[in-house]
Amino acid sequence: MKSYCISDNTDTVTGMRLAGIEGEVIHDREGILKRLDELIQDPKIAIVLMTTKTINLVGDVVSNYKLTLARPLIVEISDRHGSAKIGETIDAYISEAIGIKL
């Protein structure tokens, strides 16, 4: 199984490639949706990593995919412009998932 990154900037894609994850830079909603549909059809793709900005452009579609598709796992990642408060972000995710404030 493979992972793939859809990003709005080259720094994130370059970093992912250094980690062995292929990806591409896409800036428009139509391009992101087209590529996402292609990735969903590919049985080798298990995880799609998307930067916050790309998720925001297609959030409605991604939410629907997360509810209806078993594969691939679509994960939002922060890019170089993301929040530096990663600990607080993780706490918020956990609190939301389990329903208990940490």
Image (spheres, rainbow, N blue to C red):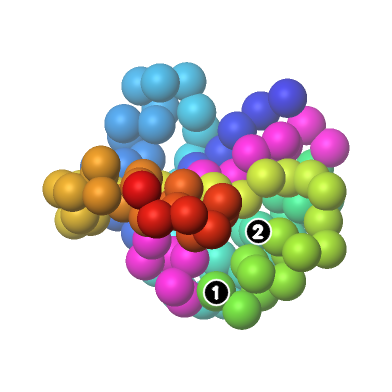
Give the labeled residue for mark 2: 36
On the question of residue 57 being in view, the answer is: yes
Q: Foreground residue, 28 or 96?
A: 96
Q: How crowded is mark 2: few (under 14 residues within 10 Å), some or many (20 or more)?
A: many
Indicate the position of residue 89 as horizontal and vertical percent values. 31, 51
First along the sequence among labels 1 and 2: 2
Left or right of 34? Residue 49 is left
Q: Which residue is drawn at 31% across and 42% down?
A: 12
Left or right, 29 with respect to 37, comes to left
Structural distance between the alpha carbons of marks 1 and 2 = 10 Å
Q: Which residue is drawn at 65% across and 58% down?
A: 36
Q: Quadrant of the N terminus?
A: top right
Residue 42 vs residue 91: left or right? right
Look at the image and say whether residue 92 sits in the magenta stretch. Answer: no
Write down the residue under mark 1: 58
Q: Is mark 2 on a helix, strand or loop?
A: helix
The boundaries of the magenta stretch are: 43-57
In this rendering, does residue 7 appear at all? no
Q: Do the residues labelled 1 and 2 touch (CB within 8 Å)?
A: yes
7 lies above or below 29:
above
Residue type pointed to by label 1: Val
> Where is residue 51 shown, x and y percent of the image?
40, 55
Q: What is the total number of numbered labels drawn onto the structure image? A: 2
Q: Is mark 1 on a helix, strand or loop?
A: loop
Q: In this view, does 9 lie above or below 60?
A: above
Residue drawn at (63%, 58%) of the image: 35
